Image (cartoon, helix red, strand yellow):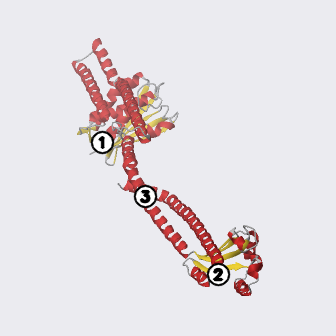
Amino acid sequence: MFRNLRISTKLLFTILPLVLFAIGLSAYLNNHYQEQEMLNQAQASARTYADIIRESLVNMMVTREKIDDKYLEQIRNLPDIQDLHIHFTIDGLRLRTIYTSDETRMSRLQKREHEAAILTSEEQEVFRTGQTTWKRSEGMYNAIIPFRATEKCQNCHSVPVGHVLGAAEMDISLERIEASINNNWMRSVLIALIFTLIAIAFGILSYRMFVAKRLEKLIVATHVIGGGNLDHPIEIDGSKDELGELGAAFDGMRQKLKKTQEELIHSERLSMVGQMASSIVHDFRTPMSTINLAIESLERGEGFTPEKTQQWYRIIHQAVRRMVTMAQELLDFSRGDIRLEKTDYSVDEFTRQLTQSVASNLQQAKVQFRVQQEYSGKASIDADRLHRALVNIINNAQDAMPNGGRLDLTVSRHDHTIVFSIADTGIGIPEEIRDKMFDAFVTAGKKKGTGLGLAITKRIIDQHGGTIEVESERGKGTTFTVSIPLN
């Protein structure tokens, strides 16, 4: 849930600036066009007022032959009209002779002309061009609208139709328009903001419902599959959109990985079977050679005493038992378990059995085997398994001396440990595998064997609570030092 909240928050802060910009731009354009429309309406109202004033003045001149001051005062008191002035010049009126001969009329016109004198060049431009001028200042619209002569005007004025007889100058208040624009601005922003927030909330809710939940399922499934569980199906839904296709692609990949994994496991199992079989043949070589030598000696039967015969039978029995033990150890190694059966065993007897089991093989390989027994007491060991561990080391030493050599076994005591030192004069251990020589199936370049022997040796010594150290120099030989606690 918190992940979805973080995603939704990130989405909000990503699109919020764009939304605010869109709101501002929309509100600005909307109010700009509204303001322009209101100003156009104000201009239209001013023209309407000017037309009404012109028609009223014409009617007054036709019916009364003079302008009513009270009417002009009423026009000036309109809410949206301020400072209404009627501008004209007597010369510009071009009154017919019948009207100019009336001194009272002319006096009144001169007074009005003086009161409404045109002072600015803009006002004079209106008389010259006949075009309305508009000038906006703070809260006000100043308009100068010309009065053009019509056919009715020609009864009193000697002018053509369209001639500018005068102009109405008025200030139109924009306070109500600006207040309306400001109110529209606030309403536009508020409405746009409300709808935007609703749209954002709806978008986030839709994202969480239709996207985030499906993505979360996909993420959980990929974590589970990444952890090695290829049986976990990837289920988003059956939709055909991008997420549905992505989920289907991931599930297809999962199935292919599972199939590939099963094929690899099957291949590894077959390889392991072959390696285990090869290791069994390699490790059984010593006891089988011992059995073969004993049987050949028994077959000849010449000069054998009953004691000698019993001795060979014991050797055969021990070799067979050792083969059974080695087979069990291979099974234990494949299961990662070696169970020791420790007893207080004579170190001297252990060394004698070890020497007897490897002597014939070493002799056939032209390896001089020397034993130095410096300790003959007892130790708490699993004799069969420790025997197996040391035989593995001796077999590797024999393999390292293909043309013969010398192998020294020294049994000694150091403090509370019994130490077996096995030194050969072989070719040494390659530098590149010294750090991994106790790993399973590391063969150290040997042409036979799979390298499982030293891995089993290391595990047996570790189970005894002991240590194994190696010193090797290429071309000069290798020394294994095995230390086992006495108790």
Q: Position of residue 140 (x, y in %)?
A: 61, 76
Label 2, residues with CA under 10 Å away: few <14, some 14-19, many ≥20? some
**Is residue 208 or residue 320 the one in the foreground?**
208
Quadrant location of residue 362?
Answer: top left
Please give the name of the residue rendered at 33% of the width and 49% of the height, measured from the top-left corner.
415
What's under tag 1, amino acid-wise?
Answer: His
**Is residue 383 or residue 80 the one in the foreground?**
80
Q: Is residue 89 visible?
A: no
Query: Do labels 2 and 1 touch, CB within 8 Å?
Result: no
Question: Image height check: is 469 above or below 321?
Answer: below
Disc 2 secondary structure class: loop
Instruction: Identify the mark at residue 464; answer none if there is no mark.
Output: 1
**Is residue 474 or residue 441 the one in the foreground?**
441
Quadrant location of residue 393?
Answer: top left
Distance from label 2 to label 1 (Cα)?
Answer: 133 Å
Whichever of labels 3 and 1 marks the residue nearer the N terminus, that label is 3
Please give the name of the residue rendered at 38% of the width and 33% of the height, measured from the top-left corner.
255
Q: Position of residue 208 (x, y in %)?
A: 38, 51
Tally the marks: 3
Q: Residue tagged by mark 3?
A: 9
**Is residue 352 or residue 60 the one in the foreground?**
60
What's under tag 3, amino acid-wise?
Answer: Thr
Horizontal side of residue 92 vs 338, given as left or right: right
Whichever of labels 2 and 3 marks the residue nearer the N terminus, that label is 3
Q: Residue tagged by mark 2?
A: 67
Q: Position of residue 219 (x, y in %)?
A: 39, 45
Quadrant location of residue 368?
Answer: top left
